[in-house]
C-alpha cells in the first residue's frame, strides 16, 4: 500500500514565473502576519484580535496553496508530456485535500 505522501507526490515545478512570484509574495505577507500574531500574543491582546489575524494568515496560505495547485493543473493540461494525465490526477487529489 502506498503512503499518503507517495499518492499525493507531484513531480512538477511551476514554470510560470509571474504566478510563482505571486505565490511567494503572498507567503511572505503571511509570514509577516504570523510575526504580528506572535507579537500580539506577547502583548496580551484579546483572543478576538488574535483569532482575526490568524484567520487572515490561514486564508493567505490557503490561497497560495490553491494557486500552486491551479497553476500546476493549467501547466499539466497545456503540456504534451506523457505523464501530464498522471500529474493532473495527483494535483486534483491535492486540491481535494484543501477543500
Image (tube, helix red, strand yellow):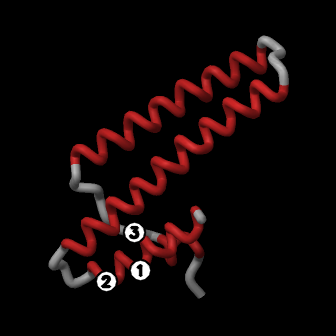
Q: CA distance from mark 3 to mark 1?
A: 9 Å
Q: CA distance from mark 2 to mark 1?
A: 6 Å
Q: Is residue 32 left or right of residue 23?
A: right
Circles 3 and 2: CB atoms closer than 8 Å: no
Circles 2 and 1: CB atoms closer than 8 Å: yes
Circles 3 and 1: CB atoms closer than 8 Å: no
Percent position of residue 62, x then y: 54, 50
Q: Mark 1: which secondary structure?
A: helix
Q: Residue furthest top?
A: 43
Residue that label 1 marks: 89
The residue at 22%/46% (across/down) is 17
* Labels 3 and 2: the sequence-earlier one: 3
Compared with residue 27, is residue 8 higher up or lower down, i.e. above or below? below
Q: Mark 3: which secondary structure?
A: loop
The residue at 58%/74% (across/down) is 4
* In this view, the mark in front (3 or 2): 2
Q: Residue furthest left?
A: 80
Q: Is residue 50 left or right of residue 92?
A: right
> How would you rate the neighbour count of disc 3 (Cα within 10 Å): few for under 14, some for 14-19, many for 20 or more?
some
Q: Mark 2: which secondary structure?
A: helix
> How would you rate the neighbour count of disc 1 (Cα within 10 Å): few for under 14, some for 14-19, many for 20 or more?
some
Residue that label 3 marks: 10
Q: Quadrant of residue 36?
A: top right
Q: CA distance from mark 3 to mark 2?
A: 12 Å
Residue that label 2 marks: 85
Q: Is residue 75 left or right of residue 62?
A: left
Percent position of residue 99, x then y: 60, 65
* Labels 3 and 1: the sequence-earlier one: 3
Amino acid at each position: 500500500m502506498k503512503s499518503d505522501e507517495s499518492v499525493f507526490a507531484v513531480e512538477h515545478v511551476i514554470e510560470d514565473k509571474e504566478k510563482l512570484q505571486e505565490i511567494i509574495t503572498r507567503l511572505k505577507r503571511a509570514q509577516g502576519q504570523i510575526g504580528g500574531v506572535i507579537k500580539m500574543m506577547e502583548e496580551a491582546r484579546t483572543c478576538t484580535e488574535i483569532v482575526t489575524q490568524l484567520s487572515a494568515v490561514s486564508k493567505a496560505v490557503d490561497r497560495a496553496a490553491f494557486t500552486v495547485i491551479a497553476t500546476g493543473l493549467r501547466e499539466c493540461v497545456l503540456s504534451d508530456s506523457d505523464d501530464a494525465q498522471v500529474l493532473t490526477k495527483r494535483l486534483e487529489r491535492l486540491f481535494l485535500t484543501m477543500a
